[in-house]
Image (cartoon, grey):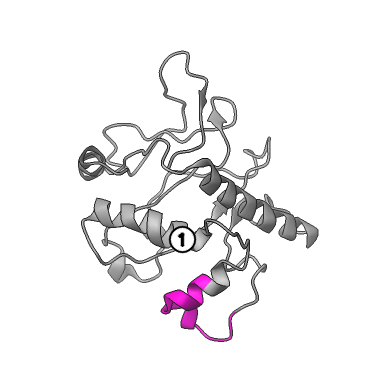
Amino acid sequence: MLTDRHCKEFKEKGYTILLDALNKQQVELLHNEADELANYLMSEQVDLVKDLGCVLEPWTCGYIDTPETKEYKVNKQEYVKIRDSIYPSDHATVSGLLFDTYAIWASQLLNSKDIYLLNEQYIVKPPLSSSYSQFVWHRDSDYYHDTSIKNQMTVACWTALDDVNRVNGTVIVEDGHKGIYASILYSADPGQDKITSIFS
């Protein structure tokens, strides 16, 4: 699915867009898990906007009991066992998407066999919440505590779980910004009102 054109675009511009990257079942899996986490937090009286800034991190939001050891950070099987307990599925799994689909794309884009998962999160923005929670364009390395790794190449995989359009918010990366900054203005073909959510 990832082509030489995507890799070239990523190298030259700092980003690439994969249309129809995930199938409907994969998007639904992620959407259902995000709903599971959001519903749990709201049942615990957590305000997703004011308390969490719309950011739900599966490992730290309280849904999963804190593991007794840190083994899951270095042992893939332990990670998968705990991670997939959030939203069990008979078909695709979230860990499968992370370690197979997304990791393969990252490996190709970075031209490296050594790929590490840095973080995963859902951004859950209720309607009319922009005055409470806005996201500025950033580099993930801006948030590293260990400054010695700030210059390592990374890939952020963003997947829209709902359809996006001019009204509900679209992140657009403008050419010439090398993937570092973007405008939150909508920039699509004239007359195009909707971009389906199956892209990363």
Percent position of residue 8, x then y: 20, 41
Q: State the residue at coordinates (69%, 52%).
A: 50
**For the N terminus, which image quadrant?**
top left
**Residue farthest along the front direction in this orientation:** 90
**Residue farthest along the bottom direction in this orientation:** 69
**112 or 57, which lies in front?**
112
* Residue 103 quadrant: bottom left
**184 or 75, which lies in front?**
75
**Segment tinted magenta in the rendering:** 67-80
Percent position of residue 54, x then y: 62, 50
On screen, residue 139 versus residue 27, left or right, reads left
With respect to residue 100, does 4 lie above or below? above
Is residue 51 visible from the viewing direction of this image?
A: no
With respect to residue 41, does 199 lie above or below? above
On screen, residue 130 versus residue 156, left or right, reads right
Q: Is 39 covered by the magenta stretch?
A: no
Q: State the residue at coordinates (40%, 62%).
A: 99
Is residue 127 visible from the viewing direction of this image?
A: yes
Percent position of residue 183, x then y: 42, 33
Q: Amino acid at mark 1?
A: Gly
**For the C terminus, which image quadrant?**
top left
Q: State the residue at coordinates (41%, 50%).
A: 157
On screen, residue 113 versus residue 37, left or right, reads left
Per the image, the residue denoted by label 1 is 96
Percent position of residue 162, x then y: 58, 38
Dot 1 alpha-carbon crowd within 10 angstroms: few under 14, some 14 to 19, many 20 or more: some
**Residue farthest along the top direction in this orientation:** 191
Label 1, secondary structure: give it.
Answer: helix
